[in-house]
Image (tube, helix red, strand yellow):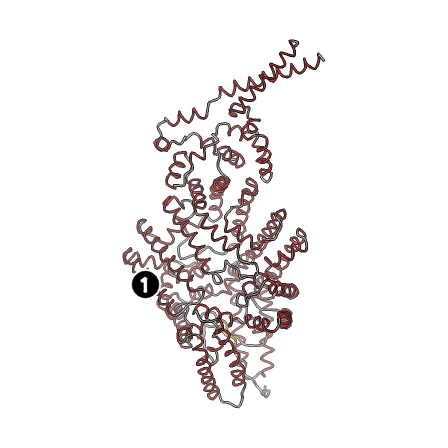
Amino acid sequence: MKPATTLLALSLVANAALAAVFAFKPALAPPAVRDWFTRGPAEETAVEAGAATSSSSATAHAASPAAAAADRIPDKFWSTLDSDDLPTLIAHLRAAGLPPHLIRAVVNAKIEKLMRPRAEALAASLSNTPFWKPDPRSSINNPGFFEQYNQLYRDRSRLLRQVLGDAAFAGTGAEDFQQRRYGGIPKAKIDLVERIEADYSEMNSQLRAAQQGIILPEDREKMALLEREKRADLAAALTRQELAEYDLRTSPITSRLRTPLTFMDATEDEFRSLYEIQRKYSDRLYPTAGMVPSPEMMAQRTAATQEMYAEIKNALGETRFADYARASNSEYQQLYRLAQRDNIATDVVVRTYNLRDSAAAESGRIAADPSLTTAEKRAAIQAIAQTTKAQITAALGPTTGNTYAQVARWLPMLERGTPISIGIDGQVSSRSLPTTSAPPTK
Amino acid sequence: MKTPVVLLLGLSLAGNAALAYFLVRGASRPDPGAAVSRIAAAPRPAAAATGIDPTVWPAVEATDLPELVSNLRAAGFPTDMVRAIVAGQLEESFAARRKALDPDAANRPFWKTVAPNPQLQLAQRQLYREYDKMLRDVLGDNAEPTDPLQSAFNQIAFGTVPAAKLAEVKAIVRNFAEKQSDLYSAGGIVMITTTEREKVRELEKERDAAIAEVLTPQEYAEYELRASSTATSLRYQLTTFDPTEQEFRTICQMQRAFDLQYPSVLAMGALTPEQSATMRQRSEAQKLLTDQIKAALGPERGEEYVRSLDYNYQQTARLVGRLELPAENARQVYAVQKEFEPRVAELRGNRSLSAEQRNQQLAALQEEATAKVAPLLGGARGLEAYRLYGGTWLRSMMPPPPPTPAAARK
């Protein structure tokens, strides 16, 4: 063998040996080819195929600074952090220096993974439902599924809170929510109240699932019992003053009042005054769910509404009562939202809304006018509709004006020539036009 | 022969030199394993207790998301954890911007809510879309969570769409949902007037046309049977009817053609005279359609189908189920309803009776009907529930008390 050939053979063997060292210890290989040694050519192809859906920037990164950073990263790092025991996992993540928001993200994902078998069992029940059968996700068609589904999410949330404490929801706006809901109640008591709320919410949810969308008399008793017990637990946990504050913040009355109070930009005193008045009437206005209101109950409700509005008017005074009545009216709320879209000033909105008052008054005057025949009254009321519509369009512009005209249900009444009246609660009702058979003397 | 050998020898020696250089360079770099040992001995109690190397995470974390993904993968994080961390990081980076959009949120009094603000809603939606796009850009298909329940939900709608076309169809549906959400928000959420409904219908047409282009006619027909608004509402509406697959296909096909020809004009607000006319036309056509479906199903099932469309019957059937009574009882209660409805109508139309006489006779009729349905519902308990679930006709036999005149505002 010639010397050059011998040298070539030795050099090739040396190359092979050096390559074998890189294959055995990829960390020693240059970054540009390290992945090749790490994964091997077959796996590399698969990874590329998988990464094809990611952005091109991600691909570009893999070969440059990211790859350089990856040089310093042990490829088994996750396995040193991972644990199915959540406190251990959290301890590992904290020790590794992950920030709280990422610890929460990882723990949440781990809980999801741990509860996956339950989710899969539920999913199997969905997958087995033929497409022509009722939607298995419906709470009415499939209350059992719905409840298990809710329970799964409740358990996940509970576990997250259990293992992470307040950090579970830090930075998610949960603190603001607690402040709004519980005000000055001490933190330890808030935790207790939240547990009470969660427990009763779960029991109520199970009860509703068992009802299958049909509330029987005994269900009402059970719901009332749960409500009484919850109340007793809250009363035991809170002082009288704290309980009153809790009621003020969590009551359905407050929920109903929030939108009107926002629209009228109410003060806290006005809110407290309205809350107290509404609380007095709530039993008559909102009887127990699942009961058919008798005609007597309906009459009581109507009377209670009238009385309540009169009392509110007395408490707020004429001007603010008008603001409240308007802000409580769904038609005004819709008009306000429309106007917001088109940056129309609030005073224009108020003036436009008040057009219905003048239209109602005028239609009433015409209806009572003995000098007009029925046909003349009808025509005069129809003319009011046209005039009012034109005023609405002039004030709001054609687009918003036309949309509002679709929402204002009293306009078609006037267009039919029917007089309207507006109750103290802002509700519009049509009045019958007395028939005049013979033309009166003019 | 001599020249190629020399050339190969030169190349091979250069290779030796390069490989040797990288080997020496690589070996002189700090060894991550050694770093672990060094830091493990460092005074960091948590790390010491857990044996976790606190120097690794700083090398993994990166503000640049593709780099973060690359590092997480290099560190052996599984796909679900990569997604969780990237989403968590994105959330954090968006939190300040989200807060800046509604800076008063934290100080808003508890008795108030956020005032309507279409600009704010638009900005919030845009921010969410930006977040979603960034997540998809960086994670690709892995941006979608692998929640089995979500997959099962998707299976209901997209079960027959071929895998190769799935992403495209889902993207079309997502795009439509975004446009629809923009439209509703622009109107103020609760404001769905006939104008908005018309625009939504146009969007639906666009979406369906786009999906039909992606799928073959056969695939599209199967998709419609599962995901169209007609199929979705039929699945709910036909619960009591309990159709077979063939019956569902027949009904859905006929109803779909009808829905496309006579779209609903129901919306908030008053109808224009044209819309009222369209609605009357639709109502007439619906009667015709019901007859056609009834004929297609045959006499017995056709009858059952018509009965199942009645909301009172649907409610009664559910009540009977809840009371654990035989399903047949629901049919018998419904038969009582059908027996009494014409008798009530006749009494109400009888002008020869005074109001008092009419009310007396209606009360007697109500008593007679109640006596018939009560045993079918298992007695007083079932009857009380029936007044709420299915028994509206029984309750409304008597005229309502005269309305209390509304107090004048001024």
Residue B112 in which image quadrant: bottom left
Q: Quadrant of residue A8?
A: top right
Q: Quadrant of the N terminus of chain A?
A: top right
Front residue of A130/B255: it is A130
As drawn, B224 above or below A436? above
Residue at (51%, 24%) from the top-left corner? A25
Q: Residue at x 58, y 37 (%)?
A: A51
The residue at which mark 1 appears reads as: A228
The residue lying furthest to the top in this view is A3
Q: Is residue B12 above or below residue A429?
A: above
**Amino acid tagged 1:** Arg
Residue at coordinates 63% horizontally, 46% vertically from top-left?
A: B164
Answer yes or no: is residue A394 visible: no
Total number of numbered discs in the rendering: 1
Q: What is the chain letter for disc 1? A: A
Q: Is residue A315 left or right of residue A145?
A: left
